[in-house]
Amino acid sequence: MKKNGFTLIELVGTIVILSLALIIVVPTVTKNVRNGMIDADTNAKSSIELAAKNWATDNMGTVGESYCVKVLDLQNQGYLDKNLKMPSNGNANINNAGVRIGIKAGTDKKTYTYKYVESC
C-alpha cells in the first residue's frame, strides 16, 4: 500500500520547530520596531527645533529672553508641513506643542537654546 502525506510525529515536530522560531523572532522584531519609533520621534522633534531656529532667525525682534513658538505657528508660516504627526503614536494634535527659545546663560554673546516642549 502506498502512503501519501505526513505522519503525526512529523507534523508535531514541524509545529514545535516553527513555534520555537516565533518565540525567538517576535520579541526581537517588536524591540526593533519600538526603537525605530523612538528614533523617528527624536528625528521629528529635531526637525521641529530646526524649524524654530529658522523661524527665530527670521523673527529676531520677537524673541526676547524666553519665548515659546508653537508648532501651529510654524505650520501656518510655512516652516513645517501642515500634517505633522509624531510617528510613535500618530498623534495629529501636536499643535499646542512647541519649542522654547531661551538665551544660554554664562555666555558673553547671545547664544540661544532650543528645546521641544509638549505645550507652550
Image: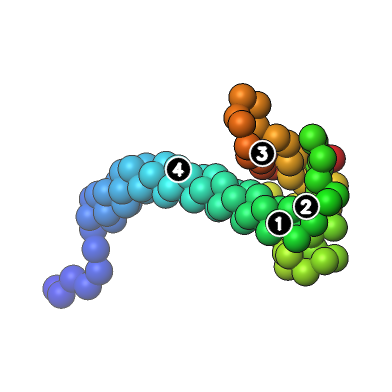
| Left or right of 120, for residue 5 | left
Residue at 80% x, 56% y: name it.
59
Q: Position of residue 51 (x, y in %)?
A: 68, 58
Judging depth in this view, the residue of 97 and 18 nearest the camera is 97
Which amino acid, mark 2?
A: Met
C-alpha span from label 2 to label 1: 6 Å
The residue indicated by pointer 3 is 110
Which mark, residue 57? 1
Identify the element where label 2 is drawn.
loop
Q: Is residue 74 visible?
A: yes
Which amino acid, mark 3?
A: Lys
Q: Is residue 71 visible?
A: no
| Left or right of 68, for residue 15 | left
C-alpha span from label 4 to label 3: 42 Å
Judging depth in this view, the residue of 33 and 118 nearest the camera is 118
Judging depth in this view, the residue of 16 and 28 nearest the camera is 28
Residue depth check, mark 2 versus mark 4: number of the one nearer the observer: 2
C-alpha span from label 2 to label 4: 43 Å
Residue 108 occupies quadrant: top right
Q: Residues within 10 Å of mark 3 (few under 14, many from 20)?
A: few
Which amino acid, mark 4?
A: Lys
First in sequence: mark 4 or mark 3?
4
Residue at 85% x, 49% y: name it.
62
Which amino acid, mark 1?
A: Thr
Residue 84 occupies quadrant: bottom right
Quadrant including the N terminus: bottom left
Q: Position of residue 4 (x, y in %)?
A: 22, 72
The residue indicated by pointer 4 is 31
